[in-house]
Image: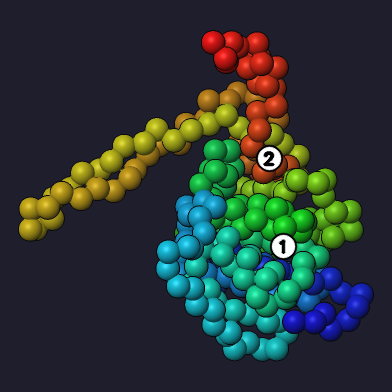
């Protein structure tokens, strides 16, 4: 794929809810206003796949028909597979920007760990591509994405104009669309967790099966967190790094007697 105009950036769009999800269709239409768009997204929902890649099964890539304003493919693999396919098999070069989403459901706080949406953005970041993950705090398939549009466009334009610090991608979360969006806040990730349990059931044949359930618990009372911003009606942006080294712990660990 070649950019139709040298002045227009090339933008990769992906997600984890699948290529037909309303969230990605919203994102595609906004990105077409900013540049030439390539879509590579899963052919089925891949939520909570994290940074999984496909190594034990075959992968399939299908070019989809569209109106000609962008190029679109569905991939049988994970969101991370989609980014790898785009860079290595379709483009053979790095796009100017990768955007992932808009996810049906929040990826604030600890949810970033499990998120296929954010893992796609992280994979792009590993490739040296400025990347943004977008998520809406509404899990409904028919969620109203309209309030997100101007923020999606302006945030993407800012990243295209300014780039991002090395090793950083943006985790952008929108409040529930029933709220009035009051603006943008740069935040830290809230200290929160899922208190989980397995709902055990028995099939008509007498075989036990389980559904994972849980309650989200925010342990953080800070006013500078993504959870606090979303509750107040602000769009939260958390700069997220994929270097998982706990640098602050290195000096303490060096005081231990490792060789005894």
Give how far across and how far down residue 157 sits, in percent.
83, 60
Q: Name the residue located 63 percent from the left edge and 87 percent from the top edge.
A: 66
Give how far across and how far down residue 113 sits, in percent.
54, 43
Other residues around mark 2 within 10 Å, as few (<14) / some (14–19) / many (≥20): few
Q: Name the residue located 88 percent from the left edge and 81 percent from the top edge.
A: 5
Left or right: where 5 falls relative to 207: right
Left or right: where 23 falls relative to 239: left
First in sequence: mark 2 vs mark 1: 1
Q: In the rendered image, is residue 26 in sight?
A: no
Q: Which residue is mark 2?
A: 243
Q: In the rendered image of this protein, does residue 243 appear above or below residue 105?
A: above
Give how far across and how far down residue 42 sits, in percent.
52, 69
Nearest the viewer among 153 and 207 is 207
Q: Name the residue located 65 percent from the left edge and 25 percent from the top edge.
A: 222
Q: Name the residue located 89 percent from the left edge and 53 percent from the top edge.
A: 162
Question: Please, what secondary structure does the residue beneath circle 1 have?
Answer: strand
Other residues around mark 1 within 10 Å, as few (<14) / some (14–19) / many (≥20): many
Question: Please, what secondary structure does the residue beneath circle 2 have?
Answer: loop
Q: In the rendered image of this protein, does residue 256 appear above or below residue 76?
A: above
């Amino acid at each position: 794929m070649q950019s139709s105009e040298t002045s227009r950036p090339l933008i990769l769009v992906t997600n984890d809810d699948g290529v037909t999800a309303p969230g990605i269709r919203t994102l595609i239409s906004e990105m077409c206003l900013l540049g030439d768009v390539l879509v590579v997204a899963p052919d089925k929902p891949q939520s909570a796949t994290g940074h999984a890649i496909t190594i034990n099964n075959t992968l399939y890539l299908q070019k989809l028909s569209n109106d000609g304003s962008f190029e679109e493919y569905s991939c049988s693999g994970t969101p991370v597979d989609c980014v790898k396919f785009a860079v290595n098999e379709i483009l053979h070069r790095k796009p100017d920007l990768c955007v992932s989403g808009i996810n049906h459901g929040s990826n604030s706080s600890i949810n970033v760990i499990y998120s296929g949406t954010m893992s796609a953005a992280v994979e792009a970041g590993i490739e040296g591509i400025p990347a943004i993950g977008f998520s809406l705090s509404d899990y409904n398939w028919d969620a109203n994405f309209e309030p997100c549009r101007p923020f999606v466009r302006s945030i993407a334009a800012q990243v295209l104009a300014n780039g991002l610090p090395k090793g950083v991608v943006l985790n952008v979360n929108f409040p529930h669309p029933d709220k009035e969006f009051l603006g943008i806040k740069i935040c830290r990730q809230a200290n929160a967790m899922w208190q989980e349990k397995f709902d055990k059931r028995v099939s008509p044949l007498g075989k036990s099966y389980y559904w994972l359930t849980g309650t989200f618990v925010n342990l953080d009372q800070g006013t500078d967190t993504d959870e606090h911003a979303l509750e107040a009606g602000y769009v939260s942006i958390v700069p997220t790094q994929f270097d998982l080294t706990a640098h602050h712990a290195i000096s303490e660990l060096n005081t231990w007697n490792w060789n005894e």
